[in-house]
Amino acid sequence: MPITCTITDGIAEVVMANPPVNALTVAGWFELADVITAAGRDPEVGALVLRAEGKGFNAGVDIKEMQNTEGFDALLGANRGCYAAFAAVYECEVPVIVAVHDFCLGGGIGLVGNADVIVAAEGTRFGLPEVNQGALGAATHLARLVPQHKMREMVYTAEPVDVSVLAAYGSVARVVPLDELRDAAFEIAAKICTKSRFVIRRAKESLNAIDPVDVKRSYRFEQGFTYELNLAGVADEARDAFVEKRDATFSK
């Protein structure tokens, strides 16, 4: 899985590059978690920029991998891998700035919702298509980006919204042209890096401690409903329809 990390002037840059749409495999989610965690533990690092190359920031889990794997190993792996990656962003010892472009869907919402600062390219779309795939999850993180009733609308309809909606709510720090996206993220990261590494790490720890919602527990609770949907047989039909590019036929 092409996930790279380079460190320059105290800024760790983690880049996802998994064409065609940056949907991550089970191994990819765990690798991303490990890379982010390791970078945050480096005492020389003062901030971390998470971004992607190619089409889209992140399209969530690799549904084709899930449907091409016998049994539930890929489903269980994807759930645990997403949990690990989202937690790695949230618990990274330094602030995480995400630079988002094109689209941010499914698992991408988990990464972005758990980040500290968000910058996005003009025209970027954010959405949770989970119900279309017979799954639930990351509403915990979407609720950190938009108010409750907007979050519910987005979950029920599975329709994405333009970055301007998130910017209006104050969730996105900057909306810039695509060719300025990386620079905008690095500008914020560089400002953070001028501060005491010790103070910034304590600030991150303290802000997480006063969060009104336990994001790890909340997300894990959501995942339980995904397991229920799989046992009910609804999820498999939804994923098959996605892979076969047809409309799903539900008996429930």
Image: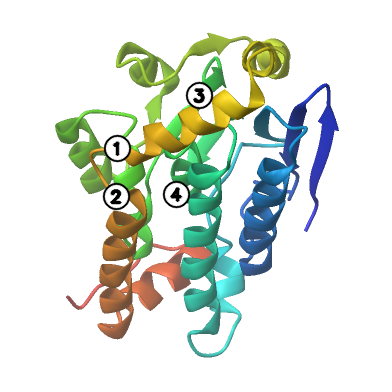
The residue pinned by badge 3 equals 117
Instruction: Locate residue 188 relative to residue 105 in the image: left or right.
Output: right
- Residue 11, position as x, y percentages in the image: 75, 26
Q: Which mark is residue 211?
A: 1
The residue pinned by badge 4 equals 106
Gap in Å between the C-alphas at discs 4 and 3?
19 Å
Ranked by sequence position, the earlier of labels 3 and 2 is 3
Ranked by sequence position, the earlier of labels 4 and 3 is 4
Type of the residue with mark 3: Val
Type of the residue with mark 2: Asp
Q: Mark 4 or mark 3: which is in front?
A: 3
- Discs 2, 1 touching: Cβ within 8 Å: yes
**Mark 4 Cα shell of 10 Å, populated few (<14), some (14-19), many (≥20):** many
Is residue 106 or residue 9 the one in the foreground?
9
Is residue 202 or residue 214 the one in the foreground?
202
Q: Mark 4 or mark 1: which is in front?
A: 1
The residue pinned by badge 2 equals 214
Type of the residue with mark 4: Gly
Q: Secondary structure at mark 1?
A: loop
Q: Secondary structure at mark 4?
A: loop
* Residue 28 in view of the camera: yes
Q: Residue at x 54, y 74 (%)?
A: 77
Q: Mark 2 or mark 4: which is in front?
A: 2
Instruction: Locate residue 102 relative to residue 210 in the image: left or right.
Output: right
Q: Secondary structure at mark 2?
A: loop
